[in-house]
């Protein structure tokens, strides 16, 4: 198993993609730390922390607890995120901008900052972020979302460059439309067979966490399915 003996922290662990990532890292032999503002059941081989991922103090305390519980941390997967469709003209205020930057960018930065001392103590590690293929070009109603996910991409590249001599890789996967119950509800006429499945994305993340990806850093990897 390619992650045997590793400890992987996953933010947004109780969402559809987060659950798939947790299942993948457990299947590959890792211990999983589940960080989420929501409640959920931690499967065997894992433990859960309820945490406000936008709070530096809360995330630091949670990750310190993870390291104490499992003896260290080898990797972080920043899954926590969200989506809202809103045109600028149709906005009563700009709340969706601050909300999406908080959930998509700030949670990613906060968790990465807090996990660094633990990765450095291990002599290296992995960080994987979740970007979006849609961030490559903005479109109507997608301004706040694409801007926030573009920020995740630039943050990924900057942090990869910062840490490249410290044996810590930082990469991002860029999904297209993920096949989730909510997306099926929102787009009832879509051809869902073209969408990428959460477990397919999770397997790519598993590769980026593994020793096989030790030379890959700063990558923005599309995971598009058939879209």
Image (cartoon, rainbow, N blue to C red):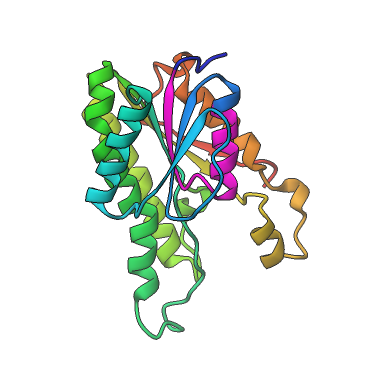
Judge from the rendering whether residue 60 lies leftward or rightward of residue 8; answer left or right. Answer: left
User: Residue 119: horizontal and vertical position, in percent?
Assistant: 28, 25
Residue 21 belongs to magenta span:
yes
Q: Nearer the viewer, residue 167 or 38?
A: 38
Q: Would you say residue 16 is visible in this rendering?
A: yes
Location of residue 177 in the rendering, given as x and y in whole percent from the top left corner: 62, 51
How many numbered marks appear?
0
At x 50%, y 32%, the residue is 46
The vertical placement of 219 against 91, above or below, is above
Residue 220 on the magenta span: no
Q: Quarter of the image holding residue 37? A: bottom left
Q: Is residue 157 at least partly visible in the picture?
A: no
Q: Residue at x 35, y 33 (%)?
A: 66
Depicted 139 relative to depicted 197: above or below? below
Occupied quadrant, residue 120 = top left
Q: Left or right: 98 with respect to 86?
A: left
On the picture, is 212 further left or further right than 151? right
Q: Which residues are magenta?
A: 6-25
Residue 213 on image: x %, y %: 45, 18
């Amino acid at each position: 198993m390619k992650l045997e003996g590793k400890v992987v922290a996953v933010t947004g662990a109780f969402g559809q993609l987060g659950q798939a990532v947790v299942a993948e890292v457990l299947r590959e032999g890792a211990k999983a730390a589940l960080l989420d503002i929501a409640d959920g059941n931690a499967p065997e081989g894992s433990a859960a922390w309820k945490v406000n991922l936008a709070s530096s103090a809360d995330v630091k305390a949670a990750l310190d607890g993870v390291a104490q519980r499992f003896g260290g941390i080898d990797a972080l997967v920043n899954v926590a995120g969200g989506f809202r469709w809103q045109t600028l003209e149709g906005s009563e205020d700009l709340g969706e901008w601050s909300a999406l930057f908080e959930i998509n960018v700030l949670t990613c930065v906060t968790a990465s900052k807090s996990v660094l001392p633990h990765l450095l103590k291990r002599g290296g590690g992995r960080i994987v972020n979740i970007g979006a293929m849609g961030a490559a070009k903005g479109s109507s109603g997608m301004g706040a979302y694409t801007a926030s996910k573009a920020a995740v991409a630039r943050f990924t590249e900057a942090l990869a460059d910062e840490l490249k001599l410290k044996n810590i890789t930082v990469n991002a996967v860029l999904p297209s439309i993920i096949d989730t119950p909510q997306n099926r509800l929102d787009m009832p006429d879509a051809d869902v067979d073209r969408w990428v499945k959460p477990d397919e994305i999770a397997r790519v993340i598993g590769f980026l966490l593994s020793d096989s990806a030790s030379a890959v850093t700063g990558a923005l990897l599309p995971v598009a399915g058939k879209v």
